[in-house]
Amino acid sequence: MTPATDSTGPIEFATILRALLHPSHEPLFSVIRVAMAAGSGPGMKQLALDIGIATGPTLAQFLAGPNEPALRHLTLWLGDGRAPTVHSPVPTYLWGEAGSGKTHLLEAVRKGLRDQGASVGWLHAGLADPPEFDERWVAVLLDDVHLYTPGQQHAAFNWFVNAQSLQRGVLAAGLLPPADLKLREDLRSRLGWGHVFHLQVLSEAERRAVLRQAADGRGVMLSDDVIDYVLHRFSRDLGSLMELLAQLDGYALQTQRAITIPLIRSMLENE
């Protein structure tokens, strides 16, 4: 059979699959899972597909709980999705302890703007050599500002000033409230003069709901016993839980087994 092609040559299977796994095709998740299991014989190695990760975090996926004001603000800030514009150029700063959802919200906003066709600047503590400010950016997103090195602080201040002069959005997040940040004063003061939201870590019941929602989005069945096991034996911050779920999903696909406590133990033993 002649392979599918585009203007640049054959289209790889992974490209086709990513298209099928677009959020608008979420009902296909479970179909693909079943089809893969049915088509894998004893001599075939099943593909480990990162099926829920490909779409990235969204504001709709964020279980707000006590953080509803921040979610509502960012939903308005992002706009209706029909144009790559940010409603308010007034900076927004999110702070709270690890696991409160700061990075999820920043990544969700970045994804929302990119889905609108916009370009954004993204600076995090792991980016050792930040680029210069780009006037095409509609917003700059600054994550984990409490960890910034002097060089990153310099870049963040430059991005902030340029964004403000061009009426572009600024969204930042850190572990501490603005007044307690150990940053250069001109950057610290600017982070605190706009909208500031203190994010709270979700309760166990709320984390349980998030984990089940994320599993449902992947077409994965998690029993109450499995959720209890995960919440009481692993890091409870949401980022770690989502990463663990992705690993469990991939391992379950490879082994063609449901996600159970024995499967979790087996995955850990084989790491």
Image: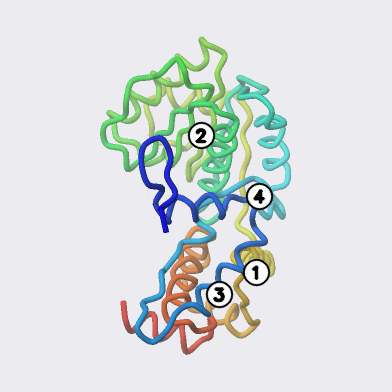
- The tag earlier along the polypeptide, 4 or 2, is 4
Query: Which color scheme did the rendering employ for the protein?
Result: rainbow
- For disc 4, the neighbor class at 10 Å (few under 14, some 14 to 19, many from 20) is few
Vertical side of 115 occupied by 223: above or below: below
Looking at numbered disc 1 in the image, what kind of residue is underneath it? Arg
Q: Residue 115 at what x, y percent from top left? A: 58, 35
Q: Which mark is residue 172?
A: 2
Q: Is mark 4 in CB contact (under 8 Å) with mark 2?
A: no
Looking at numbered disc 4 in the image, what kind of residue is underneath it? Ser
Secondary structure of residue under mark 3:
helix
**Alpha-carbon distance for marks 4 and 1?**
20 Å
Q: Residue 183 at what x, y percent from top left? A: 38, 31
The residue singled out by tag 3 in the image is: 231
The residue shown at (62%, 69%) is 30
Secondary structure of residue under mark 2:
strand
**Nearest the eye: 219 or 208:** 219
The residue singled out by tag 1 in the image is: 212
Secondary structure of residue under mark 1:
helix
- The tag earlier along the polypeptide, 2 or 1, is 2
**Alpha-carbon distance for marks 1 and 3?**
12 Å
Q: Residue 68 at what x, y percent from top left? A: 73, 46
**Nearest the eye: 267 or 31:** 31
- The tag earlier along the polypeptide, 4 or 3, is 4
Vertical side of 48 occupied by 114: above or below: above
Mark 4 vs mark 1: give the one in front. 4
Q: Which corner quadrant holds the N terminus?
A: bottom left
Vertical side of 60 occupied by 242: above or below: below
The residue singled out by tag 4 in the image is: 24
The residue shown at (58%, 50%) is 22
Looking at numbered disc 2 in the image, what kind of residue is underneath it? Ala
Mark 2 vs mark 1: give the one in front. 1
